[in-house]
Amino acid sequence: MQEYQQKFQVPFNYPVIFSRGVFDTGNLALVEALNRLQEERVHRVAAFVDDGVVASHPDLFRRIESYFREHKNTVELVCTPVSVPGGEAFKNDYRQLIHAVDVMLEYRMCRHSFVLVVGGGAVLDAIGFGASIVHRGLRVVRIPTTVLAQCDAGIGVKNGMNLHGGKNTVGTFHPPFAVINDSNFLATLPDPHLFGGVAEAFKVAMIKDAEFFEDLCAWTTAVRSRDLGVIEKIIHRCATLHLDHIRDNLDPFECGNERPLDFGHWSAHKLESMTSYSLSHGEAVSIGIALDAIYAVDQGWLSVRDADRLINALQTCGLPVWHDALDRTVDGGRLEILGGLEDFQEHLGGELCVTYPGPLGARREMNEVDEAGVVSACRRLKEERVHA
C-alpha cells in the first residue's frame, strides 16, 4: 500500500461594512466592496431582493438600477432585480431555489460574477445556498435588512434551506465576498423583525460578555420604543462578538461538536418547525435561551437573579419567553420539544453537545441533557412567565 498525505489551507477574508443609504449614488461602499480585489473588469451582478423589503421600499428597484447606471464603469447589473419571497417561505420551497439558480445560469454568471442579496436572514441563507452550488460557488455580497440578519445570520459563513421538516437540513459553508449593513432599512421593519435580532444579542452576551448583558438590560425600554441609535449599537457589538468567535474558535466550518453560538437553538429550531414557522427565528431563540437559562439555574450553573433578569429583559423588549407548543406531547407522553435534542445531535454529528450559560458571561458544553430537568424547566418557565 502507498499513501500520500495531502494537506493545504485556504484563507478566507471578507469585510463587514456598517453604512447608511447603500444605494445612494454617492455612497461608494458597494462599489468598493465589489472591486476590493482591484480586478480590471466591469463586475457583473445579479441582484435578488426580499419581497418584504420591496413592499416597504417601493422605489428600491429604481434606486438599485440608478446606482448601477451611475457606476457603470465599474459594475453592471445583468438584469432587473429579482424579487423573491421573504421569510421561511423561501427556505421551505425548492421551486424558489431552482428559479434563483435558473436566473444565475440564464445570465451566464461565472465564478467572478456577483450575486447581490438584499433581505432578511432566510433570503440570505437560501440565495447564498443557490449561489454556492452554481459553478461550485459564485461570489455573494449580502445586504442584510433585519436586526437578526445584521447582527448574526447575515455576517457568518453558513447557507441553507429547510427540508423534511427540519431547520437547515441542507446547506453549505460558503463565506460571503462582503457584507454591508445598511441601518436605513431598520426604520421600516415591523416590530417582530426589529426586536427579533435582540434575542441573538442576549444569546451571545449570556455566554461571552457579561458587560454587554448589563448594557442590554439597561437598553430594553429603548429597544421597545424603537430607538434606532441604541439598536445600531446592539447590532455592532453583537456582530463583532459573532465575527470574533468565527475567527478565533478555529472551527468556522463546524467540524467539531461544540456550537457555542447555538445556545438556546436546540429547542428554538424545534419550536420553529412545530409551529410551522409562525414563530420567527428570533422569537424562537428568545424562548430557547429563556428555557436553557432556567435549566442552567436548576443545575447550579447560573444564578436565579441572572435568569430572572434575562427573562424580564426579553419580555420588556417585546419578545416571547413561552409558547404553548412547549406543552405538546407525543406518544407515550414525552414532550415533543425533547425531540429537538435528537435533531440537534443529528445536525451536529457525533455526540450531543449543548451550550449553557454559567456563570453569566461564560459558558459550559454538556454532552448529556437531563430530560426530566428540561421538563421541569418548561413547567417553571410556564409558571414564572409574566406579561410585559
Image (cartoon, rainbow, N blue to C red):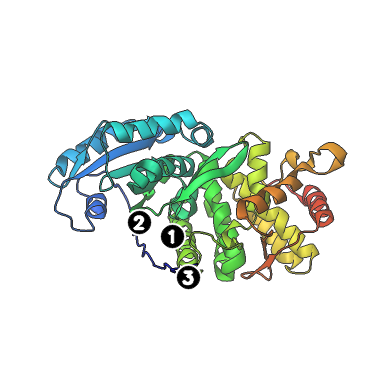
Q: Front-most of 343 and 8? A: 8
Disc 1/disc 3 C-alpha distance (Å): 18 Å
Q: Front-most of 365 and 343? A: 343
Q: Residue at x 38, y 33 (%)?
A: 100
Q: Quadrant of residue 25?
A: top left
Q: Quadrant of residue 307?
A: bottom right
Rendered image: mark on residue 144: none
Of tags 3 and 2, the one toward the viewer is 3
Label 2: few (<14), some or many (≥20) within 10 Å?
some
Asked if the residue at tag 3 contacts the one at tag 1, i.e. Cβ–Cβ closer than 8 Å, the answer is: no
Q: Secondary structure at mark 3?
A: helix
Rendered image: mark on residue 236: 1
Label 1: few (<14), some or many (≥20) within 10 Å?
some
Q: Amino acid at mark 3?
A: Asp
* Residue 137 at x, y percent in the picture: 36, 47
* Residue 247 at x, y percent in the picture: 45, 67
- State whether residue 13 appears in this view: yes
Of tags 1 and 3, the one toward the viewer is 3
In the picture shown, does residue 335 fall above or below 257? above
Q: Is residue 272 left or right of residue 252?
A: right
Q: Amino acid at mark 2?
A: Phe
Q: Which tag, 1 or 3, sits closer to the chain's start?
A: 1
Disc 3/disc 2 C-alpha distance (Å): 22 Å
Q: Is residue 140 left or right of residue 235?
A: left
Disc 2/disc 1 C-alpha distance (Å): 8 Å
The residue under label 3 is 248
Q: Residue at x 32, y 50 (%)?
A: 20
The residue lying furthest to the front in this view is 1
